Amino acid sequence: MPLSYSPPVASASELSFVQEENSDGPGLVKCWMQATPARQLPNLQKMPVLMPTAEASYHAPYDHCTVKYLQQAGLRPSWIKLADLGIRGNNHVMMLEKNNRQIAAVIARWLDKTLPPAKKNGGIAAR
């Protein structure tokens, strides 16, 4: 599904990117960001976004870039590094790990904190 940028783009070739000169730390890649002024992603700006990062995931070296890109596009993503919570060694497919309930609890707490209270709809809780 295509993303809707503001100002609009007719094709991806209209987007311009620059690579950062330095990485944000050891073991992290240098991020590719939009050239300024950055285009916004208005349809996503009011949507809560969670970026959980597992320490042994192949995404770990660049998840920070995804967070920075979303911030540059006007979003306010929540970034949870599982290792910072003492959840160590997981890979990218964290829901298949033996400690998946511990990870699910982290996500459930974020959902409870982030989303408005569920409304009752004919006996079914809807978010």
Image: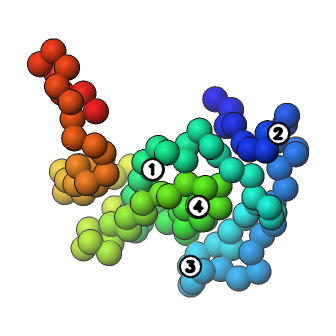
Question: Tag 1 or tag 2, which sits nearer the N-term?
Answer: 2
Q: Specify the farthest residue to the top.
A: 122
Q: Are marks 1 and 3 in contact (CB under 8 Å)?
A: no
Within 10 Å of disc 4 (Cα), the crowding (few <14, some 14-19, many 20+) is some
Instruction: Report the front residue among 25 and 68.
Output: 68
Give, as a three-letter code, the residue at label 4. Gln
Which is more N-terminal, label 4 or label 2? 2
In the figure, 63 relative to 117: above or below? below
SS at circle 3: loop
Q: Position of residue 18 (x, y in %)?
A: 81, 66
What residue is disc 1 on?
49
Image coords of residue 16 (percent x, y): 84, 56
Give neighbour class at mark 3: few <14, some 14-19, many 20+ (Cα, 10 Å).
Answer: few
Disc 4 to disc 3, how far (Cα)?
22 Å
User: Are dots 2 and 3 in contact, CB under 8 Å?
Assistant: no
Q: Earlier in the sequence, mark 1 or mark 3?
A: 3
Point 65% across, 61% down: residue: 72
Q: Is residue 98 left or right of residue 52?
A: left
Which label sits on residue 69?
none
Residue drawn at x 21%, y 35% as measured from the top left:
118
Front residue (pair 75, 13): 75
Pick the quarter of the image with the N terminus. Answer: top right
Label 2 and label 3: CA atoms lie apart by 34 Å
Q: Is residue 70 left or right of residue 101?
A: right
Q: Amino acid at mark 1?
A: Val
Q: CA distance from mark 4 to mark 1?
A: 11 Å
Q: Which residue is mark 4?
A: 71
Q: Which residue is mark 3?
A: 27
Q: Disc 4 or 1, which lies upstream in sequence?
A: 1
Q: Earlier in the sequence, mark 2 or mark 3?
A: 2
